[in-house]
Image: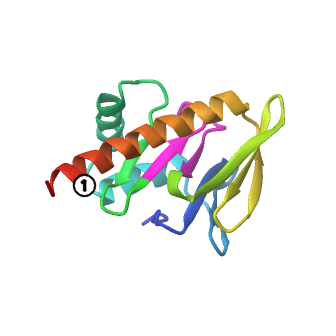
Amino acid sequence: MSYVINSQTYVLIANKTGTKIIEANKIIYSRTPLNTIINDNCFIHGSSFEGRQKGSSYLIGTNYKPPIILNENSQLILVPTHSIRNKNCTWFVLNNILNYYPKSKNQIIVEFKNNTKIVLNVSYPVFDKQVLKGTRLESIIRGRNNQKYL
């Protein structure tokens, strides 16, 4: 079994030997490729990665780089920085992002809930758009869940 994404997971970063995983209190280096970890976690929660992508795309109306709902009950929403076919694709757990801001034209600094910061090679507008997609997905899920109690 590969790494299980949870509420303590902040970011998953592909590297040459597998995946670097930053959690609230530790960094884990896994030999498992990033896409395998994402796929395995989708299956753990009862769906395929493709199913999660299609569901998100349907809900928010976008097909390009959609965020995915990994676990609706714990509101684990994963947001990609790039296409999954891009070796530089990094996945963030939306609820653990505290802030982000540009460092340079093609770099941003992402700050997490525990005030840890990382630098990524992605432009601010691209990352901001991805976070907004994740936030829209989160809002739709929250609205749908609130309808259950009306």
Identify the residue at horizontal 68%, vertical 54% (top origin): 17
**How far across and how far down the image is residue 109, in percent?**
77, 47
* Residue 18 lies in the magenta stretch: no
Q: Is residue 13 left or right of residue 67?
A: right
Identify the residue at horizontal 63%, vertical 64% (top origin): 113
136 or 13, which lies in front?
136
**How far across and how far down the image is residue 5, in percent?**
47, 62
Identify the residue at horizontal 59%, vertical 60% (top origin): 10
Magenta range is: 77-93
Q: Quadrant of residue 21?
A: bottom right
Image quarter hosting the N terminus: bottom left
The residue positioned farthest toward the front in the image shown: 150
**How far across and how far down the image is residue 67, in percent?**
45, 39
Identify the residue at horizontal 28%, vertical 46% (top origin): 143
6 or 137, which lies in front?
137
38 or 124, which lies in front?
124
SS class of the residue under badge 1? Answer: loop
Q: Is residue 114 left or right of residue 46?
A: right
Which amino acid lies under the numbered mark 1 shown in the image of this protein?
A: Gly
Label 1: which residue? 46
Tally of marks: 1
Asked whether the viewer can see residue 82, the reply is: no
